[in-house]
Amino acid sequence: MKQIQVITNGVPAEINAAAQDLAQTGKDSLAKLVNGNGEGNDFLGWVKLPSETDAALLDDINKTAANLRDLCDVVVAIGIGGSYLGAKAVIEALSNSFAAYAPSNTPKVLFAGQNIGEDYLAELQDFLHGKKFGIIVISKSGTTTEPAIAFRVLREQLEKELGREEANKRIVAITDAARGALRTLADTEGYKTYVIPDNVGGRFSVLTPVGLLPIAVAGFDIHALVAGAKAMVQGTLSGECNAAMTYALTRNALYRNGKKIEILVNFNPKLHFFGEWWKQLYGESEGKDGKGIYPAAVDFTTDLHSMGQWIQEGERTIFETVVSVANADRELRIPFEESNLDGLNYIAGKRIDEVNKMAELGTRIAHIDGGVPNIQLVIPRLDEDSLGALIYFFEAACGISGYILGVNPFNQPGVEAYKKNMFALLEKPGYEEATAAIRAKL
Ligand code: PA5
C-alpha cells in the first residue's frame, strides 16, 4: 500500500526470522478480527468503519462544523482518553504550528475535560469570557468524571453569558445512542447529537464523530481522512497489504526477545500528539494480565538532547519505531553567510528538511549500533489522506498484536481502579464500604 511503508532492516536478522515464525499466529489473529471470533469481539466496529462510513454522515458533520464556525470564535472539545486524543493528534498534525497565536477566520479548537486541573479550567474560563464560544462534549459512557466536571463548569458559563436557549444552539453532544447521563441531558436540552457506535471502543473512535467533528471544526477535510483510512482497509483485511501485519509480528518478536519498551519516534514536532494517541491505543489495548510492551514516545531531535543518552546507552530493553514523513510541506533553505562564524556554510543552500533527514538517518544508525532495534514507518506527507491511513494502520496492527500477545485488546479493566478510589475518597453515594476501606489504609 503506497501510504505506509514498513522497513525492518534496522531489526536484527534473527528477530526478523522470529517474526516470520509468528506468521501463522499473526494470520490467526487477523482472522479473529475479520471473522469476529476473538475475545472482545463486541468491540470490532472499527475494523470496517472507514469503508462503511456513509458520505451523508460526513456531510452532516461538516454542516454542524460550519454552523459552529459561524457562531463561534472558539470551540471547546470536552473529553478524555479516546474521546480526546484522536482529534487532538490530527488537529496538531495538520495545523500551522503557530495557529494558536495568529488571527484566523477558523475558530480555535481548545480542549478541556482531559484533566482535573483547577488552574487549567479557571484560566480557560477567563480566556472564554466575552468570546463567542461553543462546546463539543464527548463521552461514550456519558459518565466520566473529568469531562463531566468541565462540561458543568463551561455550560454554566455559556448559559450565564447567552441564556440557555442560545447556549443550547452552541452545544453538540457525542455520546451513546441511549445510555448515560450525557444522553439524558442532551435529549432534555435538545442539543445536536452524534452517536458513538456501541461496537467502537473509545481509543478506536477517532474516525467516528468523536474525532471527525472537532477535526472538521478546525477546518480539515474529513472526507479525505476517512478515504485515507478506507484505502488501507481492504488490503489489510485481505492480507494483500502486509504493513500492519509486518509491524505487529516484528514488535511481538522483539518483545519475546526481551525488548519490553517501544519508543515511538517522530522527527516532526507536529506529530507529538500522534505519539500521545498511539500510547493510549497500545497501552490500554496491550497492558494487561501482567503482559504488554510499554509504549513511550519522543520528539526528535528535541529529545535527543534529553532522552538521547538513555536511548543510546541505557538498559537494552527498548526498541524504536520511527514515523518518517517523506516530504515537508514548505521549502526553506539555509542561507550562505560570508563570515561563516557559526561554521554552517558547509550546509548552506540545503533545505532544513534535508538536514533533518540526515539527523534521522544518523540517529537510526547510532541507535541500531547501540543495540536499539529500529522499525521505520514511512508516510508520504502530513495530510489528511496519510494520517487516515496511519490511524487505520496502527489500529489494525494493535488488534493483531494484542491477539498475538494473548490478551483481549478491546477492554481496559485496569482503568477502573483509580476511579473507585477517587469516588471512595470523595464519598460518592454508593461507595460507603469502599470509603471505609480506603480510609483504613491512610
Ligand atoms: O479507550 C477508552 O475506552 C477510554 O480511554 C475512554 O475513551 C476514556 O476513558 C473516556 O471515556 P468516555 O468516552 O466514556 O468518557
Image (cartoon, helix red, strand yellow):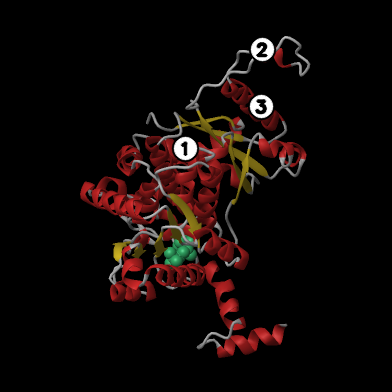
Find residue 202 and report its horizontal and vertical position in percent: 42, 60
Give the residue at x 35% y 49%: 31
> Where is mark 2, residue-wise?
336
In this view, 145 is above or below 409: below
Q: Residues within 10 Å of mark 1 (few under 14, many from 20)?
A: many
In this view, 32 is above or below 238: below
Give the residue at x 65% y 46%: 258
Q: Nearer the viewer, residue 370 or 438?
A: 438
| Distance from the alpha carbon under mark 2 to that under mark 3 | 29 Å
User: Tag 3: residue type?
Assistant: Ile
User: Tag 2: residue type?
Assistant: Phe
Please identify, in this view, whether the residue under mark 1 or under mark 2 is nearer the observer: 2
Give the number of the disc on residue 365.
3
Q: Earlier in the sequence, mark 2 or mark 3?
A: 2
**Secondary element at tag 3:** helix
Q: Earlier in the sequence, mark 1 or mark 3?
A: 1
Do labels 1 and 3 touch, CB within 8 Å? no
Find residue 5 and report its horizontal and vertical position in percent: 45, 30
Q: Is residue 187 visible?
A: yes
| Distance from the alpha carbon under mark 1 to that under mark 3 | 21 Å
Q: Earlier in the sequence, mark 1 or mark 2?
A: 1
Q: Nearer the viewer, residue 349 or 409?
A: 349
| Distance from the alpha carbon under mark 1 to that under mark 2 | 44 Å
User: Tag 1: residue type?
Assistant: Thr
Give the number of the disc on residue 246.
1
